[in-house]
Image: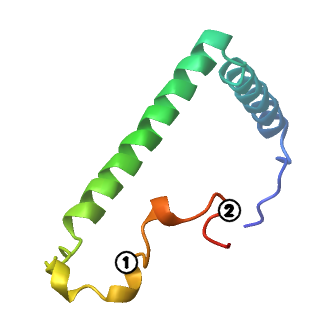
Amino acid sequence: MRLDMFSSTKTGHFAHIMLTALLGQVASVQLTPPNPDAIENYGHLIIQGLVALVTIWATVRKALQKPESVVKVSAEALPMSTLPTQPTAERGSDGGAN
């Protein structure tokens, strides 16, 4: 059995022409561009879907995070090099480079 794109009989030829015409009509009706309001509505739906996905992803990611450990340190444990050596009022107007 050999399958060709076109039939070898008149009935097959006619059926192929009618089917192609019918499919062309269906495609041309279904492929007409929507009006601008429909395009705007689809855009809003797509954006809302993306926002929902990002929100769900961030919520799940935050829920699965390990909590950070907080270490409380007293003021005596801080190194002395982080404290200023002289008060700001004693410095000159050029920032202490006298």
Amino acid of disc 2 = Asp
**Foreground: 6 or 44?**
44
- Residue 34 locus on image (x, y percent): 66, 16
Image x and y of residue 9, in percent: 83, 42
Which amino acid does the dot numbered 1 rest on? Leu
The residue at which mark 2 appears reads as: 94
Residue shown at the point (60%, 10%) measured from the top left: 37
Q: Quadrant of residue 26?
A: top right
Name the mark on residue 83: 1
Residue 49 pos. (x, y %): 42, 38
- 39 or 89, nearer to the observer: 89
Q: Residue at x 83, y 52 (%)?
A: 5
Label 1 SS: loop
Q: Which of marks 2 and 1 is in front?
A: 2
Name the residue located 30 percent from the left edge and 51 percent from the top edge: 56
The x, y position of residue 36, in whole percent, is: 67, 12
Q: Determine crowd level at label 1: few under 14, some 14-19, many 20+ residues with C-alpha closer than 10 A.
A: few
